[in-house]
Image (cartoon, grey):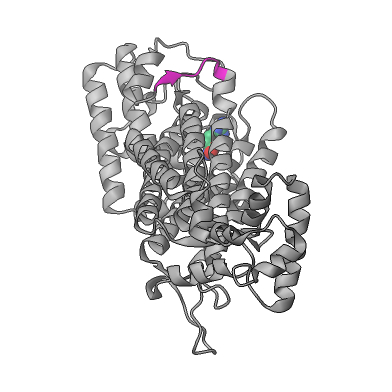
Amino acid sequence: MPTKKLWGGRFSSEEDPFFSDFNRSLPFDSELLEVDILGSLAYARALERAGVFNRRERLSVEKGLRGVLKDHLRNPGFIEESRAEDVHTYVEQALTGKVGALALKLHTGRSRNDQVATDLRLYLLQKESGIEKRILALLHTLADLADEYLGVILPGYTHLQRAQPVLFSHYLLSYAEMLLRDLERLGDAKSRTDVCPLGSGALSGTVYNIDRKALAHDLGFSTVSGNSMDAVSDRDFVLDFLFFACTLQIHLSRLSEDFILYNSGEFSFLQMDDSVASGSSLMPQKKNPDALELVRSKTGRTLGHLVSLMTVLKGTPMTYNKDLQEDKEGLFDAIKTTEDCLHMVQLVLERVHLNPQRMQESATQGYLNATELADYLVAKNMPFREAHSLIGKIVVRASELGLTLEELPIREYQSFSPLFEEDLYGCLDLKKAVARRKELGGTSPATVKKAIRTLRRKIQKYR
Ligand code: ARG
């Protein structure tokens, strides 16, 4: 049986069933049911303040709305069986079942246009706060790992070629920096979500005496929108969130990529815990890092949602257009994907088995201390470019002989330059090389220790 439309008045023929399904958003916007009811509860109070409802009516509507929510929590099947067009229609119909015509009065001065914009903002604000907590938890885990493994040396790479030794903790903190920036971006997105459009009506504002500031305050918003036309058609706040989510996931994807490599037999710097790895159906020896491969690939979904919504928005004339209904599924999926990826990476990090010895061994191969040797010559007044080229030749010589720079005899060095003396071997030590990078942002243990403390202080400030 077709349900009654909110806008049936001017229509004489029935809706085509295919159009009806095409047009419906209830199958996905039912996600907004709780915030839709929160919005209506506050709007009922605003209508009472405006003199549209008396106290008894407002109380009755409130009781009805709470009843609709309770029914839903007890039996989510109600909404699944409903043929309502969208969640707002569903709630109104369910409320009508409880309080009769009073339910229709609740829509006085309100349009689904300002209603859906309000719902989406309330919903997103809740999710943004949850995601903020998850990022903080991940930062906490990074700080703990950095503390626990302080002193372990890892080969640092550029172009995926071993380049210079760094502390493993320094490497971990590079991801903490990214996540701190993500938190800032999230805060920014949050502040732009935190604006109440309710009271804008369909597009031109309300003729009723709605105290919009009190209404916004009642709903927990910090501020109210300043232009009714913008308020019902603005979805920038969703773009802001999606951009944040993409950047965060790009960071998680990079970390995943590193760990997938480090987990391989060739690197063996770490091993995934059995609880977050999977096997092969054919090759019994395999333990695959599927969890991180999925984190890496799911980034693509969120990127898609961002591009998709930007494309939707670019062509919409003022003000509300049904195009805006397309904002939801991508956003909901991006939220869930972001939450899931954060949770997955958290589990992987908490349980990872590190192999510091392998990292250290690998750092001793590949001439990672060649730069130290160039610095040695610079200290003896050779211009850096010249030293760089000379050490390049020495590295070729050492590798021809199958020796490390530590093993190459002094006479070999001296055949390249008389500036070399026995003390050159002292500067080749990886620990010393790391310890020399002691300026702010460098990899020396003292600097990294301070950086961990700074990170912990920043986490604390958010809490
Ligand atoms: N389901 C709609 C959406 O998500 C709600 C607003 C409908 N407004 C309208 N004027 N048809 O955008």
Is residue 276 in view?
yes
Q: Is residue 51 magenta?
A: no
**Residue 52 in the image: above or below residue 61:** above
104 lies left or right of 120: left
- Image: magenta residue range: 222-228
164 lies left or right of 280: right
Q: Residue at x 36, y 44 (%)?
A: 133
Q: Residue at x 31, y 39 (%)?
A: 97
65 lies left or right of 315: left
**Residue 440 in the image: above or below residue 384:** above
Q: Nearer the viewer, residue 191 or 149?
A: 149
Q: Where residue 117 sits in the image (x, y, percent)?
A: 50, 31
Q: Where residue 66 sits in the image (x, y, percent)?
A: 26, 37
Q: Residue at x 69, y 69 (%)?
A: 411
Q: Where residue 463 sits in the image (x, y, percent)?
A: 31, 36
Q: Is residue 224 magenta?
A: yes
Is residue 26 in view?
no
**Residue 135 in the image: above or below residue 43:** below
Where on the picture, by quarter, is residue 232? top right
**Residue 414 in the image: above or below residue 446:** below
Q: Quadrant holding ligand 1?
A: top right
Q: Nearer the viewer, residue 165 or 322?
A: 165
Q: Where residue 284 sits in the image (x, y, percent)?
A: 49, 90
Q: Nearer the viewer, residue 460 or 33?
A: 460
